[in-house]
Amino acid sequence: MSAGTVILWRHGQTDYNAEGRLQGQIDIPLNDVGRAQAALAAEQLALLEPAAIVSSDLSRAVETGRALGELTGLDVTTDERLRERSFGIWEGRTHTEMRAEWPDAFAQWRRGAHPEGIDAESREELGERLVAAVGEIAGRYERSDTVVLVAHGAAIATGITALLGQNPEGWRGIAGLGNCHWSTLQPYGGQPAWRLTGHNVGVPVRDFTSAGRIV
């Protein structure tokens, strides 16, 4: 048994996103733009009549999920397995700062390798926990149900890679998602166990004032 549709929804914008800082598992809240993004995206996702909303326990994801919960009447439950990838000592840094202080490690990371001494979670480890979370949560529901999982950019892209049966350490076929965009997975009776039926879908309006209104 499994939900027939799983939506993986990235949280709205934060100040760290706007500044180009690597968030990882630092608990950064949404900014005003992120709240406006969440409200607009929630209007579209509510049309799918989700049966459940499950979020990473980081506040930027929970607040994003609550925008949908307010429209659907659903409570937002949390699962720490949906957290963003841990980037170790690089969390809170920009690429410029990382390149300046760790040039060799940063070059390795940009090539897709896993540099030593950073204490970052590997892509394989991240993929494994997302596969476990999606499978367990989806397994609580029926084929007629849609489940929305609110997570993070690297977690979603790496999780999808693993759910499609690819090795996240060496396969880079899934592009990242914009803030408050989502991807859709549906169970498949063969190999791989899931199919990607929509990716990086979102409300096409991207410009907001600091008050959260569209300009």
Image (spheres, helix red, strand yellow):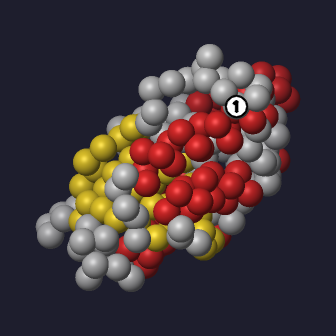
Q: Nearer the viewer, residue 147 or 156?
A: 147
Q: Which residue is mark 1?
A: 212
In-image side of 143 versus 131 (left or right): left
Q: Is residue 10 left or right of residue 32?
A: left
* Residue drawn 53% across the image and 39% down it: 40
Q: Residue at x 75, y 35 (%)?
A: 32
Residue 99 seen by the camera:
no
Q: Check the picture and name the quadrant holding the N terminus.
A: bottom left
Count neighbours of disc 1 (C-alpha within 10 A) and say few if under 14, some if 14 to 19, many if 20 or more.
some
- What x and y, as percent, mark residue 63? 68, 55
- Would residue 45 be seen by someone viewing this image from the given angle? yes
Residue toward you, 162 or 49: 49
SS of the residue under disc 1: loop
Quadrant for the C terminus, please. Answer: top right
Left or right of 172 in this view: 120: right
Q: Amino acid at mark 1?
A: Gly
Residue at the image position 60 percent from the left and 53 percent from the top: 67
Q: Is residue 81 above or below residue 41?
A: below
Vertical arrangement, residue 48 with respect to residue 114, above or below: below
Q: Residue furthest left?
A: 190
Q: Quadrant of residue 108?
A: top right
Q: Residue 29 in the image: state x and y as whole percent.
A: 78, 48
